[in-house]
Image (spheres, rainbow, N blue to C red):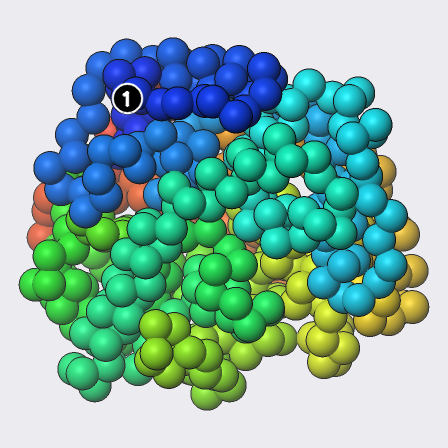
């Protein structure tokens, strides 16, 4: 199990030792709370965390780490997912000024409250539903729980804001051209509200030739690669990751940093980093002007569905970006059309989507949407096998030249992450060791 998976599990433990009053909450909420508070045993090490222990409860309610792999042990029922999609769709309709028919207590009565709350937590949408609870006609019992989720996440959001600014300013002061993608800048870009989206990692995008300098700055400021993957410039593993990968993750006390030198490992999947930097826009984060992706670039990045629409929140972001007609100025890739089809089937699309794009969405196979639907019901996967298969499928859909074919082949044979544990200065020593380690893991089924 990797560092993030173990961290996600650890954050779900020891919560039962906290004293929590559930007075004023209904029976369904108290039952849901008892279930999750008793889900694990053990102690959490908070020595490196700036968040007080009492917030550990709400870290369980809302996935705050921003990890791409989070622990969520319960399956979301089909009825709960249907209701959640209706609520999210209606909330987004309200954002766009459309008339909304309140769902009301009668409709909620068909789904146990703890099932609905599981779906809210699993799909990372408490901010959206809480902001539109009045238009949705949510019962007071649900509103109280959503408010509790947001209250528990407030300090984490503050820390995330500070770390976002700190990480970008660190690189900017050294003369490194960098964008902050996703996260708070995406929330501001799509809604104007920094709190409209939950906290997560800090994602930085730099030119490939600046990655080594950015690495030294981040590690010098306290961020660190995982101990099993501490590659350094000059090592074979660093060169392999630079050529065939697109990101490295640095662990931090306040927030982790994902350092990107490309938005996708497939060269043809996204524009060149230099082009993205040239088209940047600026948003305000914590009183500081932070550069981020232009709307059209953010839309195409999100529509690449690298995360396989694991969370409805991703599709919420996509619908918000699709409100700008300019994002449809260029032809869309097959993965982008598939993402829009998944969004239309779950959270809906705005009226700005052109007719030809709607027609192309109609041609997306139903089997693809069924697979997305099934994935939304499942717990978030703890292991990366499904993600690796998805990367290969996405790669095949975005191949545009010989370099893309090489990338796809390397993803199958010796992907970038396979080099991380190898400590060798040269390919002569690194490649055989990486192959041997990968073979052992494949044999063991890891």
Residue 212, position as x, y percentages in the image:
18, 68
Instruction: Locate residue 419 relative to residue 350 in the image: left or right.
Output: left
* Residue in front for this viewpoint, 147 or 254: 147
Q: Is residue 400 above or below residue 66?
A: below
Question: Is residue 404 among what the camera can see?
Answer: no
Q: Residue at image x 23%, y 43%?
A: 51
Residue 55, position as x, y percentages in the image:
31, 37
Question: Is residue 329 among what the camera can see?
Answer: yes
Q: Residue at image x 71%, y 30%?
A: 81
* Residue in front for this viewpoint, 335 or 178: 178
Residue 190, position as x, y percentages in the image:
59, 69
Q: Which residue is mark 1?
A: 18
Badge count: 1
Q: Residue at image x 46%, y 79%?
A: 283
**Image-quadrant location for residue 11:** top left
Q: Is residue 389 above or below residue 189?
A: above
Q: Is residue 386 above or below residue 221?
A: above
Instruction: Locate residue 314 relative to residue 382 in the image: left or right.
Output: right
Residue 381, position as x, y percentages in the image:
49, 28
Report helix, strand or loop for mark 1: loop
**Image-quadrant location for residue 75:** top right
- For the N terminus, the quadrant is top left
* Residue in front for this viewpoint, 300 or 18: 18
């Amino acid at each position: 199990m990797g560092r993030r998976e173990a961290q996600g599990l650890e954050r779900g433990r020891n919560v039962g030792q906290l004293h929590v009053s559930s007075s004023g909450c209904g029976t369904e909420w108290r039952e849901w709370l008892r279930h999750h508070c008793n889900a694990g045993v053990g102690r959490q090490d908070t020595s490196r965390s700036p968040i007080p222990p009492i917030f550990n409860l709400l870290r369980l309610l809302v996935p705050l780490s921003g990890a791409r792999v989070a622990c969520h042990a319960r399956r979301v029922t089909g009825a709960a997912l249907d209701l959640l999609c209706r609520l999210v769709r209606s909330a987004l309709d309200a954002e766009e000024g459309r008339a909304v028919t309140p769902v009301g207590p009668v409709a909620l009565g068909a789904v146990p409250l703890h099932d609905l709350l599981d779906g809210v937590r699993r799909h990372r949408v408490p901010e959206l539903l809480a902001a539109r609870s009045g238009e949705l006609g949510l019962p007071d019992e649900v509103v109280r729980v959503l408010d509790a989720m947001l209250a528990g996440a407030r300090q984490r959001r503050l820390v995330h804001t500070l770390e976002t600014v700190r990480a970008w300013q660190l690189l900017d002061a050294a003369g490194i051209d960098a964008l902050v993608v996703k996260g708070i800048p995406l929330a501001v870009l799509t809604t104007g509200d920094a709190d409209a989206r939950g906290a997560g990692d800090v994602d930085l995008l730099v030119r490939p030739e600046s990655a080594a300098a950015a690495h030294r700055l981040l590690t010098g400021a306290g961020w660190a690669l995982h101990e099993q993957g501490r590659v350094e410039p000059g090592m074979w593993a660093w060169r392999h990751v630079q050529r065939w990968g697109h990101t490295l993750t640095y662990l931090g006390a306040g927030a982790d940093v994902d350092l990107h030198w490309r938005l996708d490992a497939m060269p043809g999947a996204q524009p060149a980093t230099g082009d993205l930097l040239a088209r940047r826009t600026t948003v305000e984060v914590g009183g500081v002007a932070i550069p981020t992706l232009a709307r059209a670039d953010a839309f195409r990045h999100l529509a690449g569905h690298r995360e396989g629409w694991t969370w409805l929140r991703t599709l919420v972001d996509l619908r918000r970006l699709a409100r700008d007609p300019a994002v449809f100025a260029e032809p869309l890739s097959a993965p982008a059309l598939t993402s829009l089809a998944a969004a239309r089937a779950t959270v809906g699309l705005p009226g700005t989507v052109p007719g030809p794009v709607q027609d192309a969405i109609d041609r997306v196979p139903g089997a693809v949407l069924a697979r997305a639907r099934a994935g939304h019901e499942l717990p978030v996967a703890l292991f990366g096998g499904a993600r690796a298969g998805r990367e290969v499928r996405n790669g095949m859909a975005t191949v545009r030249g010989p370099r893309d074919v090489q990338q796809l082949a390397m993803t199958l044979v010796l992907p970038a992450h396979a080099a991380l544990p190898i400590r060798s200065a040269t390919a002569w020593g690194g490649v055989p060791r990486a192959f041997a380690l990968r073979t052992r893991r494949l044999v063991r089924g890891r």
